[in-house]
Image (cartoon, grey):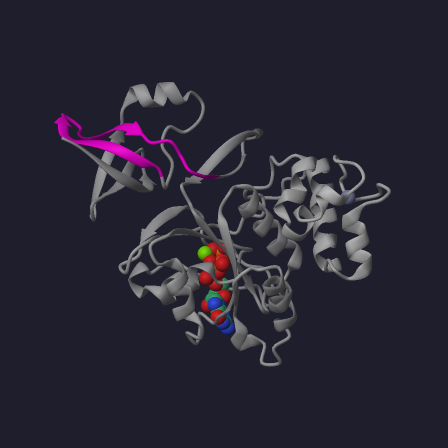
Amino acid sequence: MIETGIVLRHEGGVVIVDLGGDEVRAVVRKALKRAAGRRKAVVVGDRVDVERGGEAEGAVVVGVHARRTELSRPDPGNPRKEHILVANVDEVLVVAAARRPEFSAGIVDRFLAAAQLRGMDAALVINKIDLDPTGAYRTAAQRYRELGYTVLEVSAQTGDGIEDVRALLKDHVTTLLGHSGVGKSSIANRLDPALSLRTGEVHESSGQGMHTTTTIALLRLPWGGYLVDTPGIRAFGLWDVGERDLGSGFREIAARANDCRFNDCLHEKEPSCAVKAAVESGAIDPVRYESYLRILQTLREDAVGY
Ligand SMILES: Nc1nc2c(ncn2[C@@H]2O[C@H](COP(=O)(O)OP(=O)(O)OP(=O)(O)O)[C@@H](O)[C@H]2O)c(=O)[nH]1
Ligand SMILES: [Mg+2]
Ligand SMILES: [Zn+2]
């Protein structure tokens, strides 16, 4: 009998598949591995067909469904090779901290652009609001709301705002993206303490996280939906984007690019650029434009930034 399920994680050569609520260990059929060549045949989030008990090994993955979305990074051993980390994510929650580590617009904008370019919905979660009683993070929150993003202000420590996160996750496949130490795993634990994910300290002096989460797994939420906790990796999703495509990842730039004189305008030094005009008039936030220019530069330098 063949059943369809979703891959939760890899575990020493086999995959753990959620088959209607049962966690089943399954091997991947050799023909699938051969057909995938140097790419991984099955990744976390894949919808797969599993034959239970048909062969001596027990359950076997016999087919992989076409992916709706893919989130990838360059392969650490070979930066030209794509390493797909998770498939079929439909929503990205970009997590930033109000403090510790300091709020970084540059990193938030990278992840928002990556989500947009990969066809995933995105929202912003500002965590650790308990550390910022003056509410300085609200300026940033306002910037992203004006762009049309949902922005949640939360504290994994006090539980503030966590119910709003829960509502957003329901019945979606959502991935958390954000810098190390911003509290991605802590938010997941607050949502469902049974997850018991490992969390790490933030360096007292540098304000940097410790890269505590190292593997990717799909976590089943008891109230419906799946959540993917990820390591804090900057290179997610943007490393293979072409210079000319980057503007499509910024909503306010994409909305004006048609009004530039040149249709291949990079909105940098070109004359009659509608985007630069909007920055000068105040219609585009200069912080966002800065992020755009900075990312453009990293795409040129091929600086993938692990
Ligand atoms: N004060 C405060 N501390 C928090 C909050 N959320 C998380 N922390 C702390 O921040 C530190 C880092 O949290 P993690 O959940 O490990 O961060 P992460 O984003 O998963 O980090 P990586 O796995 O390294 O990418 C831990 O010491 C948490 O206790 C919060 O809302 N308020
Ligand atoms: Mg973590
Ligand atoms: Zn332009």
In the depicted view, which residue is nearer to us: 239 or 138? 138
Horizontal side of residue 230 vs 268, given as left or right:
left
- Can the viewer see residue 200? no
Q: Please identify the quadrant where the N terminus is shown.
A: top left
Q: Residue at x 30, y 57 (%)?
A: 221
Identity of the residue drawn at 60% across and 56% down: 108
Q: Is residue 169 magenta?
A: no
Residue 139 visible, this angle: yes
In magenta stretch: residue 66: yes
Position of 106 relative to 236 (above/below): below
- The residue at 37%/67% (across/down) is 190
Relative placement, left or right, of 143 versus 87 is: right
Q: Relative to 176, is 16 above or below? A: above
Point out residue 106 in the picture as x, y percentages from the top left corner. Answer: 66, 55
Residue at the far front in the pictured view = 259
Q: Residue 289 location in percent, x, y?
A: 73, 53
Tell me which segment is drawn in magenta: 46-70
Q: Main secondary structure of the magenta part?
A: strand
Image x and y of residue 15, in percent: 29, 37
* Quadrant of the rendered image containing residue 4: top left
In which quadrant will I find the C terminus? top right
Q: Position of residue 12 (x, y in %)?
A: 31, 37
Q: Quadrant of residue 297?
A: top right
